[in-house]
Image (tube, rainbow, N blue to C red):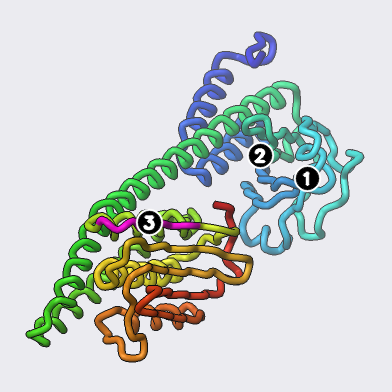
């Protein structure tokens, strides 16, 4: 118990309660740590105080000190790393209270310009039962007593609670930000992109049917390209909204959703088949692949007269193979017009570092094959 009639008078106990309450209420980590050190020095009448934050190995990664001027600290040199006496606190979680620190078994010496320190009192600061750091004070005339030790333990508990509160508050803020980003991303994907896609597909369809007015056809094709560019930028925005989340999207899922949208206005079945270990792609490469699918499937739906269309996706650790086939009447690849989107498919494939092959026959239909390298992409099983 903190309150012992023979050790704590009411004024001292009230001061301890006020200081620990103030520490717990802090929302800024630096303020909390400095306030903890200041309070420790005030309650124990110590000349110096410090708090070392430790890493997962128990070594000091941050060192906060009070009572030593910056010029003196600069003359001392490097901050403690958590060996010796401090290491005893960090690694074992015990309290160290000695009249002369040089007599402690873990004492390893001090730098030549270090202020004289004799009496020492240190306690561990724990957060969720794990050692966050060590809080210590030094140089009290007459040495530290049991009352000082109890006060330091109370401060360590208060500091641990305050630190935990700051961590939890940050976690809640991060969660809220992620949820808000995900909500915006879903709305952009499910509403804005879908509507733009529908408009772009309609423009491409009308442009293909505008045989009489070349200017009108060119304007529609330009508008469709502009919409495709906007869709690509919106996709990148969606990935950016995820912040620290991996900037990736599951390719097979994206293709299935895309094919569903493309084939919605047609009675021709479009089958998607996936084999092998399909990679997750970054935003730029994903957009290139989806544009190739868009052009290939759209051409087959609008121009081939096919009874069925298949989008085949396979991959290994080095490359992705995308094949779009139909059983339509085919076309003359050598004399095909730009209106079929062949230029866009070739451009996208080349930009991705891949190769595009197109075979078409009036009796057997059309096959579009794009092989794209994905070396370095992370892999996931679909």
Q: Nearer the viewer, residue 9 or 360?
A: 360
Label of residue 326 in the image: none
Question: Taking 182 as reference, is 339 above or below it?
Answer: below
> Do callouts 1 and 2 mark residues in contact (Cβ within 8 Å)?
no
Among the 4 quarters of the image, the one containing residue 340: bottom left
Q: Earlier in the sequence, mark 3 or mark 2?
A: 2
* Residue that sits furthest to the front in the current view: 363
Question: Which one is in front in this view, the residue at disc 1 or the one at disc 2?
Answer: 2
Label of residue 117 in the image: 1
Q: Residues within 10 Å of mark 3 (few under 14, many from 20)?
A: some
Question: Taking 358 as reference, is 262 above or below it?
Answer: above
Among the 4 quarters of the image, the one containing residue 156: top right
Classify mark 3: helix, strand or loop: helix
Which residue is tagged 2? 132
Among the 4 quarters of the image, the one containing residue 364: bottom left
Question: Which one is in front in this view, the residue at disc 1 or the one at disc 3?
Answer: 3
Which residue is tagged 3? 241
Q: Label 1 vs label 2: CA separation? A: 24 Å
Q: Which residues are magenta?
A: 267-273
Q: Is residue 268 magenta?
A: yes
Classify mark 2: helix, strand or loop: strand
Residue at the image position 52 percent from the left and 44 percent from the top? 29
Q: Is residue 1 left or right of residue 112?
A: left
Residue at the image position 74 percent from the left and 22 percent from the top? 146
Residue at the image position 51 percent from the left and 57 percent from the top? 274
């Amino acid at each position: 118990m903190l309150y012992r009639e023979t050790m704590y008078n009411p004024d001292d106990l009230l001061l301890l309660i006020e200081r620990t309450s103030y520490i717990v209420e802090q929302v800024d980590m630096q303020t909390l740590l400095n306030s903890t050190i200041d309070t420790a020095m005030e309650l124990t009448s110590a000349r110096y105080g410090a708090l070392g934050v430790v890493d997962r190995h128990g070594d000091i990664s941050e060192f906060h000190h009070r009572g030593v001027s910056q010029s003196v600290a600069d003359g001392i040199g490097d901050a403690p790393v958590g060996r010796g006496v401090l290491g005893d606190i960090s690694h074992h979680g015990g309290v160290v209270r000695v009249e002369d620190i040089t007599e402690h078994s873990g004492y390893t010496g001090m730098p030549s310009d270090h202020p004289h320190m004799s009496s020492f009192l240190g306690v561990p600061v724990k957060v969720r039962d794990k050692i966050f750091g060590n809080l210590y004070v030094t140089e009290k005339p007459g040495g530290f007593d049991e009352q000082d030790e109890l006060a330091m333990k109370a401060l360590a508990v208060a500091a641990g609670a305050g630190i935990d509160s700051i961590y939890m508050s940050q976690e809640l803020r991060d969660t809220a930000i992620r949820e808000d980003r995900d909500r915006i991303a879903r709305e952009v994907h499910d509403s804005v992109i879908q509507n733009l896609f529908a408009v772009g597909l309609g423009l491409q369809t009308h442009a293909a049917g505008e045989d009489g007015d070349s200017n009108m056809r060119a304007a529609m094709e330009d508008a469709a390209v502009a919409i495709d560019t906007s869709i690509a930028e919106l996709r990148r925005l969606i990935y950016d909204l995820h912040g620290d989340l991996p900037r990736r999207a599951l390719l097979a899922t994206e293709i299935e959703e895309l094919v569903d949208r493309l084939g919605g206005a047609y009675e021709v079945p479009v089958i998607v088949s996936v084999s092998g270990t399909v990679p997750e792609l970054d935003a730029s490469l994903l957009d290139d692949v989806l544009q190739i699918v868009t052009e290939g499937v759209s051409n087959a739906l609008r121009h081939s007269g096919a009874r069925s269309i298949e989008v085949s996706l396979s991959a290994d650790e080095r490359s992705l193979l995308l094949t779009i086939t139909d059983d339509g009447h085919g076309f003359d690849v050598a004399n095909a017009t730009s209106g079929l989107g062949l230029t866009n498919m070739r451009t996208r494939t080349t930009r991705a570092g891949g190769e595009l092959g197109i075979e078409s026959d009036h009796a057997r239909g059309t096959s579009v094959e794009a092989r794209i390298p994905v070396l370095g992409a992370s892999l996931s099983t679909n």
